[in-house]
Image (spheres, rainbow, N blue to C red):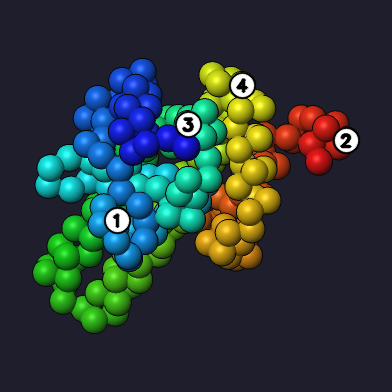
């Protein structure tokens, strides 16, 4: 099983390859509330993440997978996540629209202090904020799955698919809960379930090959 230094080196390598040097981790933390070098930050078993702290980012991995995957198996999981990170930050329209709506409401309330207009303005702000959250989350969900496809192209489909199936076969609690998550099922969670990730990679395969 890989050491923490090996996992750190692997992640740093992919950060450099994907032109994200600022994300290169200073170390590894395990997602649990027990023991040293851990964090309470929750991550799904199949989806490691980066935690930004004062002295640099750290790779956060589910404790449920400690000593259960080889370095080669961690490789596509880490690459897919770093690749996904490169797609974040591209959605700017909704925050700008929300800001414009909020400013307009404040101006209207100042010039025309009408309770009805103020109520309509606040409702508009709430609707724009909700719509923005939905659009942003759906975009992240799509980007996460797209990153899996790009990882398959880079490292080979079987590399990612095999490790996802292996993790799925472990029936880890957090992964099983995500499968039943209503938001994830309706693409309203930025983190797709294992079932969705596997289906995404096998959608173009014959049924006999995808099972």
Mark pair 3, 2: CA separation: 29 Å
- Residue, x 41% and y 62% (percent of image)? 130
User: Given this view, does label 1 or label 2 mark the residue nearer the observer?
Assistant: 1
- Are there few (<14), some (14-19), or many (20+) residues within 10 Å of tag 1? some
Indicate the position of residue 173 as horizontal and vertical percent values: 56, 64
Mark pair 3, 4: CA separation: 15 Å
Indicate the position of residue 93 as horizontal and vertical percent values: 34, 42
Considering only order in the chain, which callout, 2 or 1, is on the residue closer to the N terminus? 1
Considering only order in the chain, which callout, 2 or 3, is on the residue closer to the N terminus? 3
The label number, if any, that marks residue 71 in the structure image:
3
Q: From the image, tell me which residue sits under label 1.
A: 38
Mark pair 1, 3: CA separation: 20 Å
- Does residue 209 appear to the left or right of 75 in the view shown? right
User: Which element is circle 2 on?
Assistant: helix
- Residue, x 53% and y 61% (percent of image)? 174
Say above or below: 79 vs 34.
above
The label number, if any, that marks residue 156 in the structure image:
4
- Are there few (<14), some (14-19), or many (20+) residues within 10 Å of tag 3? some
Corner quadrant of residue 185 = bottom right
Asked if the residue under mark 2 is in contact with the one under mark 4, i.e. CB atoms within 8 Å, the reply is no
Considering only order in the chain, which callout, 4 or 3, is on the residue closer to the N terminus? 3
């Amino acid at each position: 099983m890989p050491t923490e230094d090996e996992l750190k080196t692997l992640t740093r390598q992919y950060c450099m390859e994907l032109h994200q040097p600022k994300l290169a981790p200073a170390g590894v933390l395990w997602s649990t509330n027990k023991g040293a070098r851990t964090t309470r930050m929750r991550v799904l078993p199949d989806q490691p993440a980066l935690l930004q702290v004062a002295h640099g980012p750290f790779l956060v991995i589910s404790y449920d997978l400690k000593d259960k995957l080889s370095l080669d198996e961690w490789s596509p999981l880490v690459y897919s996540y770093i690749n996904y990170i490169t797609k974040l930050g591209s959605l700017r329209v909704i925050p700008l629209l929300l800001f414009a709506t909020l400013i307009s409401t404040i101006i209207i309330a100042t010039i025309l202090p009408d309770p009805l207009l103020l109520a309509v303005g606040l409702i508009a702000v709430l609707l724009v904020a909700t719509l923005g959250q939905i659009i942003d989350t759906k975009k992240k969900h799509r980007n996460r799955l797209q990153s899996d496809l790009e990882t398959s192209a880079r490292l080979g489909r079987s590399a990612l698919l095999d490790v996802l199936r292996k993790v799925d076969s472990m029936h880890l609690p957090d992964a099983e809960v995500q499968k039943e998550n209503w938001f994830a099922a309706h693409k309203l969670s930025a983190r797709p379930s294992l079932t969705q990730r596997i289906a995404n990679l096998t959608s173009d395969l014959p049924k006999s090959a995808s099972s």
